[in-house]
Image (spheres, grey):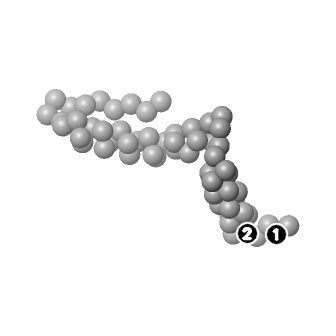
Amino acid sequence: MTQIIVGENEGIESALRRFKRQVSKAGIFPDMRKNRHFETPLEKRKRKAVAKQKQRKRGFHS
């Protein structure tokens, strides 16, 4: 769970920026997308293309 504590003199913009940075470091959004029920055809093609590139990069040719 990502959590930040806003300081007394800290603006909401900087607190939101810190929160977004922590969420991206934790990898919450990609995990959320992966576990989402519906995946559009475009997202499916992109995911498969990225997986294929990673597989080629690692040296596993099928």
Label 1 is placed on what type of residue?
A: His
Q: Are marks 1 and 2 in contact (CB under 8 Å)?
A: yes
Residue under numbered circle 1: 61
Which secondary structure, mark 1?
Answer: loop
Q: Position of residue 58 (x, y in %)?
A: 72, 67
Q: Residue at x 30, y 39 (%)?
A: 16
Q: Local crowd at mark 2 within 10 Å, few (<14), some, or many (≥20)? A: few
Instruction: Classify 53 as above or below 29.
Output: below
Q: Residue at x 29, y 30 (%)?
A: 5
Q: Residue at x 63, y 46 (%)?
A: 40
Q: Which of the 4 quarters of the picture holds residue 6?
A: top left
Q: Position of residue 55 (x, y in %)?
A: 73, 63
Q: Which quadrant would the C terminus be assigned to in this image?
A: bottom right
Residue under numbered circle 2: 56
- Taking the image as shown, residue 20 lies to the left or right of residue 62, namely left
Q: Which of the 4 quarters of the picture holds residue 50?
A: bottom right
Q: Position of residue 15 (x, y in %)?
A: 27, 38
Label 2 is placed on what type of residue?
A: Arg
